[in-house]
Amino acid sequence: MELRGYGLLVLAFVVFWVSGCATQERLAMERPPEGAGVVAKYLVGVDDTLSVSVWRNEELSVSAIVRPDGMITVPVIGDVAAAGRTPEEIASDIREHLSKYIRSPQVAVSVTGLVSSAYLTRIRVTGAVTQPVSTAHRPGMTVLDAVLEAGGLTEFAAPDKARLYRKVDEKVKAYPVFLKQILQKGDLSTNYRLLPGDIISIPERSF
């Protein structure tokens, strides 16, 4: 009896140790970076409206919609490439062209009408959810918020194999999301706050 009791004690210790290691591994898991530095700079897209302001030269200032060919037209210098560039890059290009006609031109470009960003900044939930969605990002939005907007998980979902895909340093990285722990145990350690462009994927379990 003593030997059997000792065996059970050892078994309990092993189970506790393995469980502890798993918990430590989960706590040490790499978390997705957050903050403004992670969100890529906004690139102007087709149909966006730009305001081009040239200091002390009102006749050169203009409001222009980015055409399907990615260009805008600026007085004196003509067409300037806009799509796929930041406002700062566009302003620098215009400044360079205008310097042929004006001494030390000061140019500012701002986006006054966002259209293309509606696609680029959305949150997407795919896989084993009731209704896969592509929804607008909202400040403070979390993984759980997005999953609930997708109608929740299906009966075939593998909730603890979910992944959050986020673009970091021009590379897409995958971060584990333990949805079962979130939904059933209230463990919010992987209920990450979402950033524009994030994708949540929930696979189906294997039978």
Image (cartoon, rainbow, N blue to C red):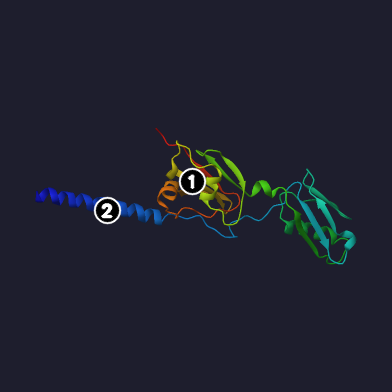
Q: Dividing the image into 4 quarters, which one contains the C terminus? A: top left
Q: Residue at x 26, y 50 (%)?
A: 15
Find residue 32 and report its horizontal and vertical position in percent.
50, 55
- Pointer 2: what residue? 16
Measuring from the top left, give residue 171's x and y in whole percent.
56, 50
Earlier along the polypeptide chain: callout 1 or callout 2? 2
**Residue nearest the observer in this picture, 36 or 78:** 36
Give the left or right position of residue 169, taking residue 5 as reference.
right
Q: Residue 107 sits in which quadrant? A: bottom right
Residue 151: percent from the left, percent from the top? 53, 42
The residue positioned 23% from the left and 53% from the top of the image is 13
The relative height of residue 206 versus residue 175 in the rendered view (above or below) is above
Q: Say which of 72 and 132 sits in front.
A: 132
Label 1, secondary structure: give it: strand
Q: Which type of secondary structure does the marked residue at label 2 adopt?
A: helix
Of residue 193 and residue 57, the one placed in the foreground of this image is 193
* Dot 1 alpha-carbon crowd within 10 angstroms: few under 14, some 14 to 19, many 20 or more: some
Task: Tell me the kind of residue under disc 1.
Answer: Arg
Viewer-proximal residue among 3 and 70: 3
Query: Could you tell me how far apart the alpha carbons at marks 1 and 2 are, in whole angstroms?
Result: 27 Å
Q: Which residue is mark 1?
A: 163
Identify the disc placed on residue 57.
none
Is residue 134 shown left or right of residue 78?
A: left
